[in-house]
Image (cartoon, rainbow, N blue to C red):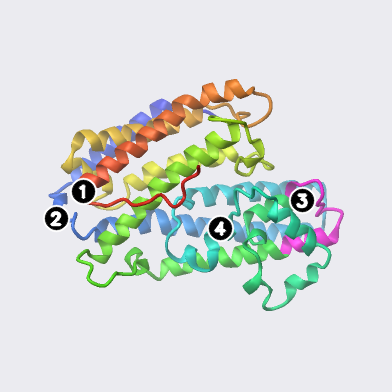
Amino acid sequence: MLFSRQKNRQSHVLTTALTASLIFSTSAFADDWKSTLSGIKEDQIAPSYQAFANSSQALSNRIETLCQSPSASALAKTKDLFAANVDDWQAIQWLNFGPVTYFMRYYAFQYWPDKKGVTQRQLRTLKKDPSVMDQPKFWKAASIAVRGLTAIESLLYRADFNPVNKPADCHLLESIAKHHAETTQSVYKQWSDSAVSDWVFMEEGSTETADKLAMEQVIQQWLEHMSVVKDSKLETPIGYKGKPKPKFAEFYRSDLALASMRTNLTSYQALYHSGNPSLFAVALEQNPETANALDEQLIKNQELVGDLPDNYFSNQLSHEEKVALARPLVSSISQSQTLLTKVVTELGFQIGFNSRDGD
């Protein structure tokens, strides 16, 4: 499904007008960033984690029903809820910060890229005796490779697992989905009970406020995730700079790679405009040309990823066709990174090493 350019442009004009009307000496906010952070949490972080927790629970309930009354129809409904849960995760995947970092939960939600097939090997071991997962302390020591969406996808889509006809496989699926739902709910609750700045640990002698350091972390996560989308989600699977690696595409078994990228790129613009004042509003006062250029580029990203055909990651397109189609989007995301770096540098932020570089 293609994105509507006209709708995006109209939304952009309206957002710009409304944001501009709310600017009242935004420079007064630029030192503490409390209002911006509060808006990002209330508009993006908390609602996204709530949606993720809700769809995780719905998926867990559906899997329980599947195991009680296994059928092809029940499996199809389960896969639909899995896709919904993945989409909710993609809306907040950019943020590897806060409670999700405790106990490696970020990587447990999605163990990807699984370049050595660790998930499959560990699932095959577990299916020999799924009852071990019922032990009270199992999940405290369990591998992150069998805790979340990657493991659930394998059990739903790999040919060597059959939750409809093999009760042991369904028991495995049910246990993982239940733990996944409990974990997402825990992360959501922790965000509900805290501010973004609560997750910043101040260094001794720091002259910065906790709010500014927290905002810096949010921006860092956003920039790093742009690299993940461009490098790991797009370039690596299609072989943009080398040999294609189609099995490295995100959620390639369930064919959700393209939908995931679309949600990622949509979440970026929402993040840019969250808060009062938003990062966009503050940047607009500092440097209107750069602030608007970034906004336009974020819209362009959405349009370009929307223009990719729905079968983009399939084998129906040649390597050459995929690379040619990807070039405008790769260039656009790279330009977004450059513009965002310029925006935040002009606002006094120091952006460090990219710890999630997809190369």
> What residue is disc 4 on?
107
Label 4 or label 3, whichever comes before in sequence order? 3
Identify the mark nearer the N-term, 4 or 2.
2
Residue 199: x and y, percent? 37, 67
Given contact means CB atoms under 8 Å apart, are the residues at marks 4 and 3 in contact? no
Of helix, strand and loop, which one carries label 3? helix
Q: In the rendered image, which quarter is residue 124 located in? A: bottom right
Query: Which of the 4 image quadrants contains residue 201?
Result: bottom left
Please identify, in this view, whether the residue under mark 1 or under mark 2 is nearer the observer. 1
**Is the Cβ of the residue at disc 3 closer than 8 Å to that at disc 2?**
no
Q: Is residue 303 visible?
A: no
Q: Nearer the viewer, mark 4 or mark 3?
A: 4
Contact between labelled residues 1 and 3, with CB atoms less than 8 Å apart:
no
Horizontal arrangement in the rendering, residue 280 relative to residue 270 (left or right): left
Q: Position of residue 325 (x, y in %)?
A: 52, 23
* Mark 4 and mark 1: Cα distance apart in space: 31 Å
